[in-house]
Amino acid sequence: MKVRCCGAPGKNPPKAVNKAVIDGQGSIPYATLKEEKTPNTAMGKVTTGKKRGMGAALRGSRFTSA
């Protein structure tokens, strides 16, 4: 015995493309993947400095970032 659900088999899906097609306006290519160098977090660098502006007056005048 065969059970049919939803009638006919589904259509073939559309092919994958590497651009966005906007009706009446053309197409925009998607970005390509690129290898990027990342910083070495094991060799951290501490920076100190002096804040400027009104926020510095409210929260103190010096900062330290690691």
Image (spheres, helix red, strand yellow):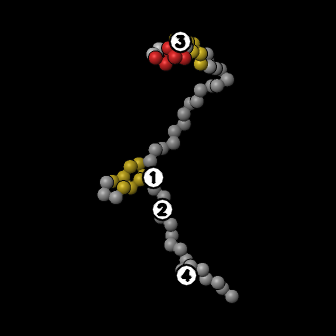
* Labelled disc at residue 61: 3
- The kind of residue tagged 2 is Lys
Looking at this rendering, what residue extends furthest in the front direction?
A: 58
Q: In this view, does 41 lie above or below 61?
A: below
Sequence-wise, which precedes: disc 4 or disc 1? 4
Category of crowding for the residue at label 3, using alpha-carbon neighbours closer than 10 angstroms: few (below 14), some (14–19), many (at least 20) = some
Identify the image quadrant of the C terminus.
top right
- Secondary structure under tag 3 reads loop
Q: Mark 1 points at which residue?
A: 18
Q: Which of marks 4 and 3 is in front?
A: 3
Q: Name the residue under label 2.
A: 15
- Alpha-carbon span between mark 1 and mark 3: 50 Å
Q: In this view, does 7 lie above or below 36?
A: below
Sequence-wise, which precedes: disc 2 or disc 3? 2
- Alpha-carbon span between mark 4 and mark 1: 33 Å
- Secondary structure under tag 1 reads loop
Seen in the image, is 13 located left or right of residue 21?
right
- The kind of residue tagged 1 is Asn
The reply to whether dot 4 and dot 3 touch (C-beta < 8 Å) is no
* Labelled disc at residue 7: 4
Residue 44's quadrant in the figure?
A: top right
Identify the image quadrant of the N terminus.
bottom right
- Secondary structure under tag 4 reads loop
